[in-house]
Image: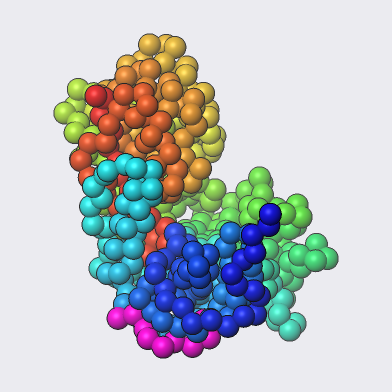
């Protein structure tokens, strides 16, 4: 028998918002049937219109408010919500931090896990924090524009201030945009797969202020390339690197495999936790350096190193955590699947005169099996996986190596809960409170540090 949803499309209803989803949408229930509503906050009473009905849930839009939350921020720019740049900007910052703490606690609760979650570590200024931007370039009404896509679409909304990016990066994007217009360089057209420039990427060192401009092109060369490059570095004195990345495929992937330096160096440098890092166009580097220092310091403190330990850093990237750990450990092993990242990691070890760290290119789960077979006995294993979390084979081989401590740096509470349960099945328990860190203010994302110890 098919159970009919208690609401229908286009129906208008009065509802109370009871919670926020992990994506930051308000939740109302009609006869236990959840409706998800953008720009609605817990405690608010509003009139909504149902926009979509699925089997077990629906979506609605807010029409008018009967009462508003005391945590609602007035005068927000709806462009940042439409583009998904700042989906939580209408929620006061202290309430954002509580929401992130609650999000982790709630997921452990649902898994019948009794854990303590500490208050989220926030920022003094929760805007203008990103040290990297990737913006699309498109023609609108015959003029080249830079901006951001409207959510769930490829309609470009022109923007000059991105709110959560370093203002020097926003200014650089405008300068480059104006020069592209001046040299009449055609923007890429997705529909016809013609045109030249697809995206502009800008990276800026938070401490060093060195800037890299990456021009992502459909073609091997940009028209007026030499003059354009000359004008960019004249207009932007901080630029120490201009790079061309070629992506000729019809794809949503931003970068292609061919990268050529057009001016300056192939990398920019920045410091993190007192260490110097070379960052190339394609290497992963945390986008919020101020919070990354808090996050990594927390991971190192919780590892409790005395200088005698062997440590494994799975998913090491360009070596940011590995090298910070190496200052406090006897030996560190790092692994990452991206060959360029490992090249950078080796250069970064030399730059910082650290000789007690070895880096390997492989899938973390495969390398762990090899290390386990080779009889490597780590005292501490640090994992900082992507959003999909850990492979079960990695959890298996880590547990077999029997480290006293596992420090789990997570960017997705849902996969953290799943992985913690798998470690618990293999004799590990959570030690102390889980510590959330707000790496991405104005968005629902949350990072956290969890320590597991052998029972």
**Which range of residues does the magenta coloring cover?**
62-70
Reply above or below: 119 against 90. Answer: above
179 to the left or right of 81:
right
Which quadrant of the view contains residue 338?
A: top right
**Percent position (x, y) of residue 358?**
39, 25
Residue positioned 36% across, 23% down in the render: 426
Give the image quarter of residue 181.
bottom right
Q: Nearer the viewer, residue 72 or 272?
A: 72
Query: In percent of the image, x 59 and y 69: which residue is there?
Result: 6
Residue drawn at x 38%, y 11% as measured from the top left: 375
Magenta: main secondary structure: strand
- Tell me residue 185's x, y (percent): 72, 71
Q: Position of residue 332 (x, y in %)?
A: 33, 27
Q: For this view, does 221 lie left or right of residue 100?
A: right
**Left or right of 432, for residue 151:** right
- Viewer-nearest residue: 374 or 40: 40
Quadrant of the image containing the C terminus? top left
Residue 99 in sight: yes
| Residue sitting nearer the eye, 87 or 361 | 87
């Amino acid at each position: 028998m098919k159970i009919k949803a208690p609401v229908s499309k286009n129906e208008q209803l009065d509802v109370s918002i009871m919670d926020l989803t992990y994506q930051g949408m308000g939740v109302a229930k009609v006869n236990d049937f959840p409706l998800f509503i953008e720009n609605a906050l817990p405690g608010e009473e509003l009139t909504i219109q149902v926009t979509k009905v699925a089997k077990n849930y629906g979506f609605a839009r807010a029409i008018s408010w009967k009462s508003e939350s005391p945590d609602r921020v007035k005068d927000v720019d709806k462009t940042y919500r439409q583009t998904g740049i700042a989906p939580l900007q209408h929620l006061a910052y202290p309430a954002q931090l509580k929401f992130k703490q609650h999000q982790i606690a709630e997921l452990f609760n649902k898994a019948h896990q009794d854990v303590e979650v500490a208050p989220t570590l926030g920022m003094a200024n929760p805007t203008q924090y990103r040290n990297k931007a990737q913006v699309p370039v498109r023609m609108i009404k015959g003029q080249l524009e830079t901006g951001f896509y409207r959510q769930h679409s490829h309609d470009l909304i022109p923007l000059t201030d991105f709110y959560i990016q370093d203002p020097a990066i926003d200014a650089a994007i405008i300068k480059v945009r104006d020069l592209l217009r001046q040299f009449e360089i055609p923007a890429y057209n997705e529909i016809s797969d013609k045109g030249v420039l697809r995206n502009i990427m800008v990276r800026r060192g938070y401490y060093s202020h060195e800037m890299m401009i990456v021009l992502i092109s459909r073609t091997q060369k940009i028209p007026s390339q030499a003059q354009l490059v000359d004008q960019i570095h004249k207009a932007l004195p901080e630029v120490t690197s201009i790079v061309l990345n070629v992506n000729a495929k019809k794809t949503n992937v931003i970068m292609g495999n061919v990268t050529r330096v057009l001016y300056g160096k192939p990398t920019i440098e920045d410091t993190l936790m007192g260490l110097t890092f070379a960052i190339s166009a394609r290497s992963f580097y945390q986008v919020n350096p101020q919070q990354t220092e808090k996050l990594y310091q927390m991971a190192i403190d919780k590892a409790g190193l005395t200088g005698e330990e062997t440590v494994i850093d799975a998913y090491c990237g360009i070596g940011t955590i590995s090298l910070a750990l190496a200052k406090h450990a006897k030996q560190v092993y790092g692994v990452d699947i991206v060959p360029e990242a490992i090249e950078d990691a080796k250069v970064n070890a030399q730059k910082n005169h650290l000789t007690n760290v070895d880096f390997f290119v492989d899938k973390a789960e495969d390398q762990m099996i090899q290390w386990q077979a080779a009889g490597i006995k780590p005292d501490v294993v640090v994992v900082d996986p992507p959003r999909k979390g850990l492979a079960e084979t990695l959890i298996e081989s880590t547990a077999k190596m029997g480290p006293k401590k596992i420090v789990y740096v997570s960017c997705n509470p849902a996969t953290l809960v799943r992985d913690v349960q798998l470690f618990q099945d293999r004799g590990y328990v959570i030690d102390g409170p889980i510590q959330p860190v707000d790496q991405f203010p104005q968005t629902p994302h949350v990072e956290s540090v969890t320590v597991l110890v052998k029972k």
